């Protein structure tokens, strides 16, 4: 019997929980992989993230209720950051499809955008926007408009 260092268990990585409550075809495995890679690259491999795909009616209800803004939007983020729970990213594929000709690219951009908001990034001011857009493009592979 040989003795030596005990191997460290492999890091499990982020946990991404998905809820798909709409009918537009979405490549969920690819978006979960993107979310996981983004969290690891941003130094948060230890968190749980909820990723929901919803109808325009559902995201409009959330937009009005939590942002006090009328109409549907493409993505919303709800931070939690308690006991490893980073928060929720809610994406509306139908709104995304109306906003961009490449739905898959737009969904990648929106998932990363939502995660970056949960990690504390913002785009209210030009300097913040440049930092967020650079990271968003790096992780998603898509340029922001």
Image (spheres, grey):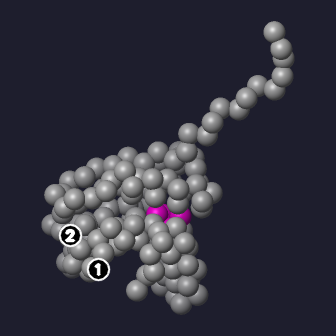
Task: Give x and y (percent) for residue 126.
Answer: 53, 90
Q: Is residue 83 above or below residue 141?
A: above
Q: Which residues are magenta?
A: 114-119
Q: CA distance from mark 1 to mark 2?
A: 10 Å
> Based on the displayed image, in which of its 4 quarters is residue 44 positioned?
bottom right
Considering only vertical position in the picture, is 68 above or below 93?
Answer: below
Q: Secondary structure at mark 1?
A: loop
- 118 falls in the magenta region: yes
Relative to 29, 39 lies left or right: right
Q: Quadrant of residue 2?
A: top right
Residue that label 1 marks = 100
Tell whether 52 sits left or right of 11.
left
In the depicted view, which residue is nearer to us: 12 or 140?
Answer: 140
User: Label 2 belongs to which residue?
Assistant: 94
Neighbourhood count class around disc 2 (C-alpha, 10 Å): few under 14, some 14–19, many 20 upward: many
Q: Quadrant of the C terminus?
A: bottom left
Place of residue 107 in the rendered image (x, y in percent of width and height, measured from the top left): 34, 67
Question: For residue 120, which numbered disc appears in the image?
Answer: none
Label 1, residues with CA under 10 Å away: few <14, some 14-19, many ≥20? few
- Please name which of the two marks, 1 or 2, marks the residue nearer to the observer: 1
Question: What residue do we see at 53% from left, 56% from top?
Answer: 37
Main secondary-structure element of the magenta-colored stretch:
helix
Residue 124, compared with residue 22, is above or below; it is: below
**Does residue 48 appear left or right of residue 10 in this picture?**
left
For marks 1 and 2, the one nearer the N-term is 2
């Amino acid at each position: 019997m040989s003795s030596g260092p005990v191997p460290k268990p492999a890091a499990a990585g982020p946990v991404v929980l998905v809820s798909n409550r709409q009918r537009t075809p979405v490549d969920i495995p690819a978006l979960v992989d993107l979310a996981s890679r983004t969290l690891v690259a941003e130094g948060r491999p230890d968190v749980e993230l909820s990723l929901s795909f919803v109808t325009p009616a559902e995201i409009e209800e959330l937009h009005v209720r939590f942002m006090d803004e009328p109409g549907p939007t493409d993505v919303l983020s709800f931070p939690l950051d308690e006991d490893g729970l980073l928060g929720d990213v809610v994406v509306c594929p139908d709104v995304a499809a109306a906003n961009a000709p490449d739905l898959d690219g737009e969904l990648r951009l929106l998932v990363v955008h939502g995660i970056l908001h949960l990690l504390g990034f913002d785009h209210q001011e030009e300097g913040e926007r440049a930092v967020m857009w650079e990271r968003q493009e790096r992780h998603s592979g898509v340029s922001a408009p």
